[in-house]
Amino acid sequence: MSEERSVRSAAVLAAYALALAACGESAQPPAPAAAPPAPAPAAGAPAPAPAAPPPVAAAPAPAPAPAAPRQVPMSVQGTASAGLTVRVKSVEMGEDATILDISASFENRRTNFTNLAESETYLADSAGNRLMLKRPPDNRYLRIMSGDTMQGRLVFLGSVPPSETQLRLVINDGMPPDSTAGPGLAIALPLKPAGGS
């Protein structure tokens, strides 16, 4: 009798163990399937090319640099009978302005000063075009005291054509050369050396 109970108990325990095992297997998620290995290239076949990098946008082309100003050294002098002497040392021709490097001296015992821009002062080309003086805000009439020399750069608004061979500096247009307020004076400025092409 006791032997029969032992057999039954063993059978129940075995059935219980099988049920637990079945439950444990169903509770666990199935393992993911392994990815199939990449096929090896056939002998003698070229290796696959690497993936091309994404296209790169081309950088915009840089803007062309402005042309360098053309500079003509010179030593040209003009005088007016009122006691004014003006010497032009160079002409610099840029895209928007033309600049003269000058020295101007004045000596007259009848007055304390004179002006280089009492009336219109400008550069004229061979066609008669005028490049007007840009008057400096701190000395609009370009005043020079008697007995002094003024060194500076006069700026004229506008450009000179590359083919131009001569300019004319006009100081105090329409004024007589003996005017102490602003003597009139015109100076020819050759832009090419004599005999040059």
Image (cartoon, grey):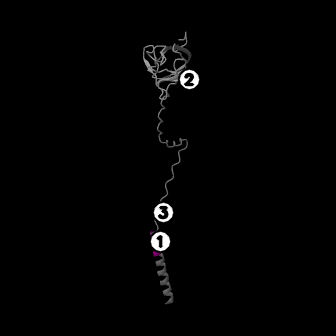
Viewer-side residue, 42 vs 83: 83
Which SS class for mark 2? strand
Of tags 1 and 2, the one toward the viewer is 2
Residue 187 lies, in percent from the top left, at: 50, 14
**What residue appears at the point 45 percent right and 69 percent down from the top-left corner?**
27
Q: Identify the residue under disc 1.
A: 24
Residue 109 lies, in percent from the top left, at: 54, 17
Q: Please determine whether, in this image, residue 83 is positioned above or below residue 53.
A: above
Which SS class for mark 1? helix
Q: Residue furthest bottom?
A: 1
The magenta segment is 19-26
Circle number at residue 151: 2
Sequence-first tag of 1 and 2: 1
- Regarding residue 163, the answer to whether it shows in the image is no
Viewer-side residue, 166 vs 100: 100
Sequence-first tag of 3 and 2: 3
Residue 164 lies, in percent from the top left, at: 48, 15
Disc 1: CA contacts within 10 A as few (<14), some (14-19) or many (>=20) = few
Q: In whole angstroms, how far apart are the C-alphas of marks 3 and 2?
A: 95 Å
**Amino acid marked by disc 1:** Gly
Residue 25 is a magenta residue: yes
